[in-house]
Image (cartoon, helix red, strand yellow):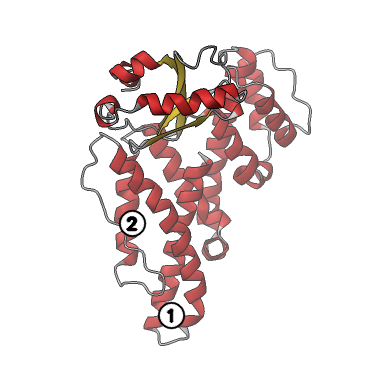
Amino acid sequence: MSSLYKYSKQLREYLQVSKRFYNTKLEGKKYKLLQPRLFYSAIELLSSQREIQDRIRSTSEEFENIKALKIFLYDVLEDTEKNLGEYISWFSKSFLGENILYESIFNLFINSNCLFISDYSEALNVNQKEIIEKELVEFVKAHLEATIINEVIKQESFYGEKLINIIQGTYFNGALPVFKTEEEVSEIVKSISDEIIIESFEDSFLEIMDITIPEIFHKLTALPDLSESFKDWDELKYHLTKRFNEGNGYGAIFIKSNGSFGIGILPEEYQMLPPISDPGKEVYIAMDKSGICIVEKTTWEDVKSGEAFKKFD
């Protein structure tokens, strides 16, 4: 969720600086003074756009009426505001898959950025600011309440000590209250000051969301049968056997979301299953699916037949 927030902030920043740049240029003022800010906001947004385009290319899902986002490094067009508005609408409704949760969170992020980008914050009147703050505070408290109830009262989630430490350190002065009922949770969470909620939103609360809300997922296009496109599996087995004899028991075939692959050793954080005992028979496969690495031990026999890769379809 923090990545989605960062992206929404990039969109809002580019929109703001583009509007100022265009209006300043139209008024015949020194618009070139804004070119450095336009350049850096465009560069950041372009980086995110490449990731989104890669996701679109690698998924089998259909996106209706894909909107092109026009981004320029040194100038803006007259219809920049309209173009950004149409793109944000497409991203919210289509790219997020009509998932009401993600759509509402993204829309909240887009609106709440007005509080955290200085140009917008300064331009808000008192009523506008109160409306945005109210929406933000209500969302945060509702999510905190549900999270604490599921973790502490119902014990239906097991996010663990890291989550509890963030909650008690940010909202309860380092000591989590003794909650006995859902009503107590609701009452105490509602008593948290709005100032704390807003001040901690961009760090602590986004971290809580990263822990408790799954990443946006798109089904990847099925990979081709790699056994048909690459026959020399024995050569790869030979090299991984050499690594095994050097003491590396986690030799793996790495498959990326774009279908490319290679061999190597699993990173330590993925070495949760037992190491390979016979490199002539066993090998790990590490599949990158939408940014999530899925690891499975298989046999060279299944690799050569193609059966090993069908498990990831």
Q: Is residue 292 above or below residue 37?
A: above
Q: Residue at x 26, y 53 (%)?
A: 67
Disc 1 residue type? Thr
Q: Quadrant of residue 266?
A: top right
Viewer-nearest residue: 165 or 120: 165
Q: CA distance from mark 2 to mark 1?
A: 21 Å
- Asked whether, in this view, residue 150 is left or right of residue 253, the answer is right
Q: Is residue 200 above or below residue 27?
A: above
- Asked whether, in this view, residue 287 is left or right of residue 192, the answer is left
Viewer-nearest residue: 255 or 28: 255
Q: Residue furthest left?
A: 65
Q: Answer whether residue 146 is visible to the viewer in this image.
A: no
Q: Answer whether residue 207 is visible to the viewer in this image.
A: yes
- Asked whether, in this view, residue 27 is left or right of residue 273, the answer is left
Q: Point out residue 306 in the picture as x, y percentages from the top left corner.
A: 29, 19
Q: Is residue 276 above or below residue 100?
A: above
Q: Point out residue 118 in the picture as x, y percentages from the top left corner.
A: 58, 63
Q: Residue at x 34, y 39 (%)?
A: 258
Mark number, residue 85: 2
Badge 1 is on which residue?
24
Disc 2 residue type? Gly
Q: Point out residue 307 in the picture as x, y percentages from the top left corner.
A: 30, 16
Viewer-nearest residue: 83 or 225: 225
Mark 2 crowd level (few <14, some 14–19, many ≥20, 10 Å Cα): some
Element assignment for label 1: helix
Q: Quadrant of residue 188?
A: top right
Q: Which numbered disc flags the more N-terminal residue, 2 or 1?
A: 1
